[in-house]
Image (tube, rainbow, N blue to C red):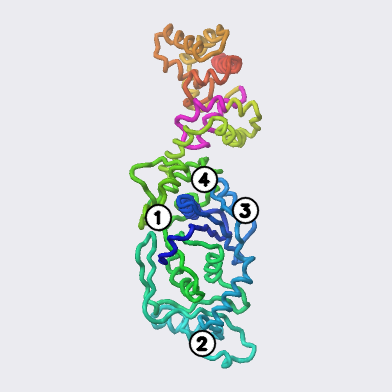
Amino acid sequence: MNATSETRAVVTRFAPSPTGFLHIGGARTALFNWLFARHHGGRYLLRIEDTDRARSTDAAIEAIYDGLEWLGLMGDEPPVHQFERAPRHVEVAEQLLAAGHAYKCFATPEELAELREQQRAAKQPMRYDGRWRDRDPSEAPAGAPYVIRLKAPREGETVIDDAVQGRITVQNKELDDMILLRSDGTPTYMLAVVVDDHDMGVTHVIRGDDHINNAFRQLGIIRGMGWEEPVYAHIPLIHGADGAKLSKRHGALGVDAYRDEMGMLPEAVINYLLRLGWGHGDEETISRERAIELFDLAGVGRSPARFDIKKLENLNGFYIREADDARLAALVAPRVAALTGRPVGPDGETLLTRAMAALKPRAKTLNEIADGALFLFAERPLVPDDKAMALLDQAGLDLIAACIQALSGIDTWTPEAIEHQIRGVAETAELGLGKVAQPLRAALTGRTTSPGIFDTLSLLGKEETLARLSDAAALGVRG
């Protein structure tokens, strides 16, 4: 670690490769970079590492932007596109070559394949053997293609004081002379990353610990150019509940799936990712403002964090209960429309807003709210499920008939008036309230679960309530 890095204004970056969706692990890396910059009053930048033209797509770039915007983690400045900076990367490679820190390598693909085969047979590490490191380029055939390789140190060791992992030491003999420019003159990812970090003024490189080996190799470029070294902070990867590296078999990997398919709120995902490998005492629910106040790299653990979807769902339930009802209604309306096949419309969204106080207390996802709200948008006559139909036996239908009579007399449809009448039916029948509520719920929703029965009646309104109860009563006539 370069001690002077601590005195510079903090600049962090998130640098995804646009080959697909925004990975949930990438989102955590972005969050840690964003929080560290905010905590220290610095800048957080975004760079799209699109040097791999075959795999980089505009759709993937848009998906990354979409996910970052949803989480509130877009950069403080317009994103940098690595591919557009290729001339600058080439310039640095040529400077390293001129200074004697890099060299032209004329080894042919056939020679390198033979070298790898020999190393494999001898059970040696497969790395370039430096055969052109000290040779004069004039020894190569005229016009022969070449790559430019970095002259990695051969003696001693390289030490990184990682802000998360602690001191890490690598023997320099383990480092290879990596390629900076390919034979077609295009820069490699390893070169581009270092040049871009320097030119963007990045002071702290916070990234996954799968990049630790890259750091030692990239330092050769930094030192060859005489640039100031960044502070490295390599955070452990996220594992599944079984301890294996997070993969598709553990569930959704893309941030978009947590929003679109699973019905999570961005503040819940942010809070969960924050606590995934970082902690502060016993605090579980931490607002963004509180996270900015608390976050530092000292709180990041060295062991892989285990992803627990149940914990995320519980956090999401907390934030749903805290959320504004109108905001929730706007998020739930398209989910209801998808389930019913009909648009909800402004009146339906207003109804959803009114219903939120009854729908959200036990819900853990927006999907659960949408499912719970379906009864409000059901078309008559309802088709009760098997469990609900079982409650609409003769005894249940008798209670529904009594409820129709009692509720018909209500002039002002208020929860208090509704409760008074339904309790009166229960007392007359000498039954507990639940025994009356069960067939009522079955008739009104077609299910055995719903919000509280008085909330259900109140939200449906007098006209719709009596119509649905009459439909149910007609089942007895047809039977």
Give whichever of discs 4 and 2 has the lower sequence position.
2
* Residue type highlighted by circle 1: Leu
Q: Do residues under tags 2 and 3 come within 8 Å of each other at their CB atoms?
A: no
| Residue 130 picture location, percent across and down | 47, 84
Extreme residue in the bottom direction: 139
Q: Nearer the viewer, residue 167 or 383?
A: 167
Question: Is most of the magenta stretch helix, strand or loop?
Answer: helix
Question: In the image, which is nearer the foreground, mark 1 or mark 4?
Answer: 1
Whether residue 299 can be seen here: yes
Any mark on residue 33, and which? none
Q: Do residues under tags 3 and 1 come within 8 Å of each other at their CB atoms?
A: no
Give whichever of discs 2 and 3 has the lower sequence position.
3
Q: Which residue is painted at 57% across and 52% down in the image?
A: 76
Q: Magenta stretch containing residue 358, yes or no?
A: yes
* Residue type highlighted by circle 4: Tyr
**Label 3: which secondary element:** helix
**Label 2: which secondary element:** loop
* Residue type highlighted by circle 3: Glu
Give whichever of discs 3 and 1 has the lower sequence position.
3
Callout 3 environment at 10 Å: few (<14), some (14 to 19), or many (20+)? some
Q: Which residue is painted at 63% across and 71% down in the image?
A: 87
- The residue labelled by disc 3 is 62
In the rendered image, the vertical position of residue 266 relative to residue 229, given as above or below: above
In the rendered image, the vertical position of residue 245 relative to residue 333, given as above or below: below
| Residue 451 picture location, percent across and down | 48, 25
Q: Which residues are magenta?
A: 353-380
- The residue labelled by disc 1 is 297
Give whichever of discs 1 and 4 has the lower sequence position.
4
| Residue 308 picture location, percent across and down | 40, 47
- The residue labelled by disc 2 is 132
